[in-house]
Amino acid sequence: MRDFQECLNIVSRKVSNDLHSLEKLLDISEVIISERVRGNLSRILDSVANANPEEYYFVEIYNEELKARCILVFEGGNLLRVAFGGTDSNVLVNPEDFCRRISDSEIALFKVVLPLLQWKQDMVFGFEPMDSQHEKILHKWNELIRELLRGEGKEAVVLKELVNEVFKHLAYEEDLMRRYKYPKAKQHFKDHEAFRSLLNQLISRADKIGVIGMLRENIGFVYAYLAHLNSADRELASFLKKNIL
């Protein structure tokens, strides 16, 4: 009875987040499975209630027979977002029917891995302000994901702030490469132009389909930038240290 009532209290709330969006957010978040049970929603909710208030969790409830799913997003023990519906958009599922079948549902608790992109010691190249700029870009990325988890509608603003930080950083590096005649400048500039073009496309795409949808389509750009940071930028920093410091 407790599981049924807790389920009904959650899925009967006014749901302002569509299921498809939260499924995509779960896809792009780095998570680890904390628990997976059958039917015992109370146990999962008790685990979340005792969570660190700075940690984020997804709870996914899926009933195979009804082809229905509910996804919850928690910040510590605070329920931030709820999405509920049938996995087939043409089929309507009654929340009360779903909760009556809670004992037959698969329930998983996912903990979001934070920080989402870690600033590590091997990313420090010993040349300022390049190191500080790189660190700020990674922190801004983590801020973007937190805003997506909170669902307060600020993610588009943070995305543009992130892109502006990257653009300022690219311009700073290019000024140094010109000034000190960096021998690998041609390829480095080419990489930068590719990043600028891609980031402008991502902003345009986010305006059309939302930030979560855009990231799901293009999440690889983050790892491409990290690869550039750890190779091309590392070489540039080494050159600058020898020729300036």
Image (cartoon, rainbow, N blue to C red):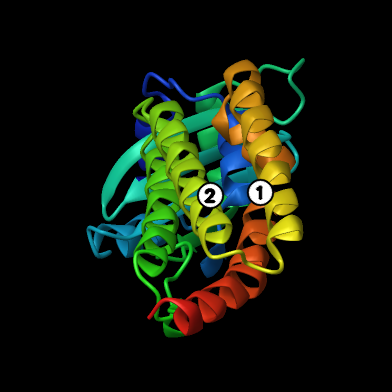
Would you say the residues marked 2 and 1 are in contact, meaning their CB atoms lie under 8 Å apart? yes
Residue displayed at 26% across by 59% down = 54
Label 1: which secondary element: helix
Considering only vertical position in the picture, is 137 above or below 4? below
Residue displayed at 64% across by 49% down = 27
Q: Nearer the viewer, residue 145 or 233?
A: 233
Q: Report how many numbered discs are placed on residues in the image.
A: 2
Counting from the top left corner in percent of width and height, residue 76 is at 27, 55
State the CA–CA distance, disc 2 to disc 1: 7 Å
- Answer yes or no: is residue 79 visible: yes
- Answer yes or no: is residue 4 visible: no
Question: Left or right of 15: which side holds 25?
Answer: right
Instruction: Check residue 192 in the rendering and tell me which mark sits there, or answer none.
Output: 1
Question: Left or right of 120: which side holds 199?
Answer: right
Considering only vertical position in the picture, is 206 above or below 185? above
Question: Left or right of 196: which side holds 165?
Answer: left
Q: Nearer the viewer, residue 6 or 210?
A: 210
Label 1 crowding class (10 Å Cα cut-off): few <14, some 14-19, many 20+?
A: some
The three-letter amino acid code for the residue at tag 2 is Leu
Instruction: Check residue 56 in the rendering and tell me which mark sits there, or answer none.
Output: none
Label 2: which secondary element: helix
Residue displayed at 57% across by 42% down = 25
Q: Which residue position holds label 2?
A: 170
Hey, which quadrant is residue 38 in on the image?
bottom right
- Counting residues from the start of the chain, the first of labels 2 and 1 encountered is 2
Residue displayed at 48% across by 64% down = 117
The three-letter amino acid code for the residue at tag 1 is His
Counting from the top left corner in percent of width and height, residue 21 is at 59, 31
